[in-house]
Amino acid sequence: MIELSDDNFESAVLKSKTPVLVDFWAEWCTPCRMVAPILENLSTQYGDRLAFGKMNVDAGRKTATQYGVQSIPTMLFFKDGKPMRQFRGFMSEKELKKNLDAALTP
């Protein structure tokens, strides 16, 4: 998992050659803490096909605002520097994997 900030978002996500799933979260958010281990597990399953990043909305307000994140957890799937899909709220591992597989299919 890549720790993202307003400062490294462009280089780590927008300029990435690999698709990136960005988890917008906060420490005080219970559903965010529930989805975190699922994302950690998925990050090992997808290996080099998909990068995973975490953006704390309290520290990265500029980026969160830029992408219209109004509730958390919100996950944005970026490909070629563009947000392609958005997932909101807690999802089971099975549900999230299904959505990621669909996003990765050309």
Image: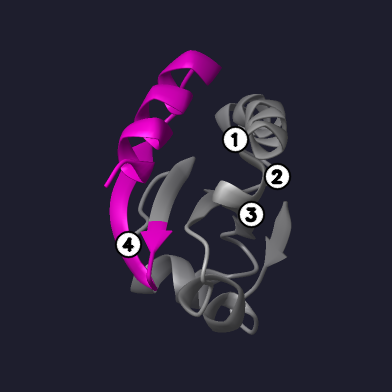
Q: Is residue 12 left or right of residue 101?
A: right
The residue to which callout 3 is attached is 54
Instruction: Please name the residue shown 38% across and 62% down the image.
Output: 79
Q: Mark 2 near mark 4, Cβ–Cβ under 8 Å?
A: no
Q: Mark 2 near mark 1, Cβ–Cβ under 8 Å?
A: yes
Q: Within 10 angstroms of label 4, few (less than 14), some, or many (20 or more) residues?
A: some
Query: In terms of secondary structure, where does tag 3 sit?
Result: strand
Instruction: Please name the residue shown 51% across and 71% down the image.
Output: 17
Q: Amino acid at mark 2?
A: Glu
Q: Within 10 angstroms of label 2, few (less than 14), some, or many (20 or more) residues?
A: few
Q: Mark 2 near mark 3, Cβ–Cβ under 8 Å?
A: no
Residue 86, above or below 9? above
* Mark positioned earlier in the residue sequence (4 or 3): 3
Q: Amino acid at mark 3?
A: Lys
Q: Amino acid at mark 4?
A: Pro
Question: Residue 84: image x %, image y %?
Answer: 28, 56
Instruction: Please name the residue shown 41% across and 35% down the image.
Output: 100
The residue to which callout 4 is attached is 83
Q: Is residue 31 left or right of residue 3?
A: left
* Mark positioned earlier in the residue sequence (2 or 1): 2
Inter-mark Cα distance, 2 to 1: 8 Å
Range of magenta residues: 78-106
Query: In terms of secondary structure, where does tag 4 sit?
Result: strand
Question: Residue 51: image x %, image y %?
Answer: 60, 54
Query: In terms of secondary structure, where does tag 2 sit?
Result: loop
